[in-house]
Image (spheres, rainbow, N blue to C red):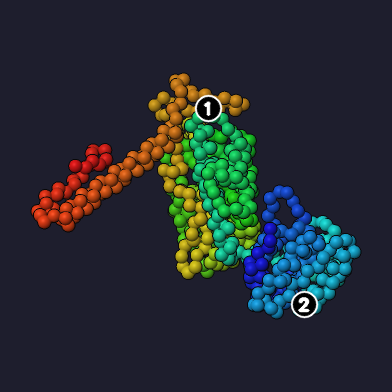
Amino acid sequence: MAIDAGLFWRRLSQLQTCFKSEGHWRKVDAISILALDRSDETSFNKSSACFLHLFGRELPGSLLIMVEDTMHIAASCTKCANLEDLLHRKPPSMENFTVVIHRISMHSDVEIVCKHLIDVIRQSRGGTRLGCLTKMQHSSNLSDSWNANLLKAGIDKVDVTSLLGMHMSTNDDYAQLCVRRAATVTHKVLKHGTIRLVEDAFDEARPVTHEELAAKAEDFCENPSKINLKIPPGPLESCYFPIIQSGGDYDLRPSASTNERFLSDDVVVVSLGARYKSYCANMARTLFIDPVPQIQNTYSVLLDLRRRCLDVMRAGFQLRCVAEAARSFISEKHPNLLGCLPKSLGFGLGLDFREAALILNSKNPNLFAPNMVFSLSVGFHNIPLAPAEKAAARGSVRKLSKYSILIADTVMIQGGSETPEVLTKHSVDWCDVSYFINDSSDGQRIVLESDGASVQSVAHGTARSSRLRDRKRGFQEETTCGNRKARQAELMQQKIVSKREEAQHIHNGHQRASSMLSKVPEIEAYMYADGEFFCC
């Protein structure tokens, strides 16, 4: 796949402008980025993000050095052949900037190139401070030789991880398009894939583990055609193994993992994210099965909290305003939930899944800027559920001593004073996330055997009715009925037009048209009690 030369030069120009500007970048004399060797696993690191940002690919095992007016790239002969086309497509605006490609084919080449690049750094500004990704530790022939030469030359390493993260966080048109498509896939997989799997598991009284559900959700992310979703061609994968949690054991951190326990009909937290052309999106929803009033009230509080967080995510505001607004609201209105509020309420998204410079906590002074993308993750962790609050509970909710709630969405910061655009547009309304499936009249509920091998319907031994399927069927019937009514109204209008056109034709062809036209009856429409039309 050819490198997008236009995109490369635009982004290189932006990076050069930042590097030459006053401020934090003046603390370094050059920038050095080593690309990690290839890995078959999905990984997120600043090194890969930088190469993807510029070249649209990772270029594993390569080295990039940037000074004020020149960028040097040391890579294998094969990679250099792909890069050389960029030199012939340089725009006039970059006439004074030079890109130099260094071919490496054997160990001796590595040493020669490293020594030459050390000399390049020494001639840039003060020549002693090199901006690096200091936390990136890896070993290869090139990296070992490079680090040894830096140490020998006495050049100091300065960490620029956050600076590069902030630079790449303001998305251009191409990045915005990729993020939007990633968000669309994420939303559709959750709506048409994962949630339907959860509904079917309860509807069919079928035992299924969290891990099984997560595996299918991941498959949907990477093969969206399985849920009849068509998107433009491009690399598509899951950002992480989806997280499915229920049964009272919850972890709201983005690093949480899915366990092998069976899905429980109580409070189900679903988190997943898709990655399109290396750009990430993320979302989470909580589903409530036979919730008690206390759970519904807490969810209502969370929706209010989410609105307040979105309200302060505006260009020019500090990132810490989100956590401060959340804490202030909960402290004032619902102090009993303060201990359940996570310290972080989200993070920046892009080529990195979790941008360390853009964490939404109470200590981050960085500013929101237009076209930045975030995962806003609001939730309450381990909310206590007292026996009195679940006395009338049905299903597995009665077993809970605590539960958690999470809502996460991918949002894009807007210009001016506008609130952010929510890109993962799945409903958060209570009616769309709550299910009532266990009868109170007969005490019937679903019980998984301890070994997960079978499911029984207990109480009076009656079979469980398919309430979720009835609910979906009812919606489908309403939709069909609505379509039928619309079609009938359309046919009625067509009849009115037809009669009037017929009358006009008579008027044009006969001398007594005026009298005849006056006798043409109007079509009257009546509505049955069930809302359907008929005409006469």
Vertical relation: 38 (above or below) 66: above
For the point 41% across and 33% down, which residue is it? Answer: 470
For the point 55% across and 38% down, which residue is it? Answer: 246
Q: Is residue 132 left or right of residue 93?
A: right
Q: Secondary structure at mark 1?
A: strand
Residue 533 visible within the image = yes
Mark 2–mark 1 CB contact (< 8 Å): no
For the point 19% across and 54% down, which residue is it? Answer: 505
Q: Position of residue 301 (x, y in %)?
A: 45, 50
Amino acid type of the residue tagged 2 in the rendering: Ser
Residue tagged 2: 124
Residue tagged 1: 447
Picture quarter containing residue 83?
bottom right
Query: In the image shown, does 356 or 350 lie closer to the viewer?
Result: 350
Crowding around mark 2 (Cα neighbors within 10 Å: few <14, some 14 to 19, many 20+) is some
Sequence order check, earlier mark of 2 and 1: 2
Amino acid type of the residue tagged 1 in the rendering: Val
Q: Quadrant of the C terminus?
A: top left
